[in-house]
Amino acid sequence: MQSSLEEKQSKVERDTLMMELNGMVQKMINESSWWERRGVDCSILMAAFVSLPTAFLQLGSSQPLWFSLGVMLGVAHAVITVKGTHLASHRALSESQVWGKFWTTFFIEVCSSFSAEAGVHGHIKMHHAHTNVIGLGDSSIWKVSLLLRIIYLFIAPLALPVITPLVAFAHLKGRALVLVIRTVLMVGLGLYSQLWLHINVSGFRSMHSALFCMLACRAMFSVPYIHVNIFQFCSAISFFRLLPSLQNSGLKMKPIRK
């Protein structure tokens, strides 16, 4: 009986905390202008897409200095796949449901080589730090505990461009056939398009060199991305442990804007 009462009380506290969090987020949204809500992020994404032609062309240069500017491709890819996917998973790029679904499929499946449905569910339900506060999910999406620490932190993340589509296809098990076909086609389209651009725009003569460059561009920011993800998980746990003392002290928490 005592255990049942404690569970009910815990659930009420979690629901209350979630309502408070949603209220703070909604208040911040209502007080923000269109430029703050969408303009800044859309401008950053547009700048990333605009830099792509120059980046692909510079990778075909025989001059070391100009070739080194091809690093823009890795930067643009990181912006598009991380920021674009994050915004698309929240349907934050458009108020239209149709366009929201389109951008979700484009950024998650075509650009990021992952399943849109699995990506949205994993991000909203499992990844966010606030889900740790209410006792749901886990903010860490990188768990390979059998590896040595150095390999886990600095080497294994470089394989993310290869691992990601494999995990995406694994998530398709049991899904509707139409969804499976769409995901496979969209992921294939994204991978083939970049490979085609490396060969026909950058001028790589070898398939192996084009594939290596493609892997390097996609893995360029995988190590810092994993580190941010890990530390976000640690901070979420710390916040969860400190929460009772913060509430008892009467301290009002101000939401942090990203």
Image: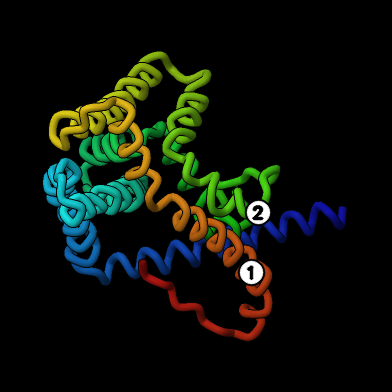
Residue at mark 2: 149
**119 sits left or right of 187 in the view:** right
Viewer-nearest residue: 234 or 53: 53
Left or right of residue 193, residue 16 in this image: right
Quadrant in the picture for residue 97: top left
**x 47%, y 53%: residue:** 223
Q: Residue at x 16, y 53 (%)?
A: 66
Labelled disc at residue 238 = 1
Image quarter (top left, top right, bottom left or bottom right) of the C terminus: bottom left
Q: CA distance from mark 1 to mark 2?
A: 22 Å
| Tag 2 secondary structure | helix
Q: Residue 232, relative to residue 62: is it above or below?
A: below
What colour scheme does the image use? rainbow
Q: Residue at the location (29% across, 47% down)?
A: 77
Which residue type carries mark 2? Arg
* Residue depicted at x 22% and y 48%: 94
The x and y percentages for residue 158 are 47, 44
Q: Name the element at disc 1.
A: helix
Q: Position of residue 69 (x, y in %)?
A: 20, 54
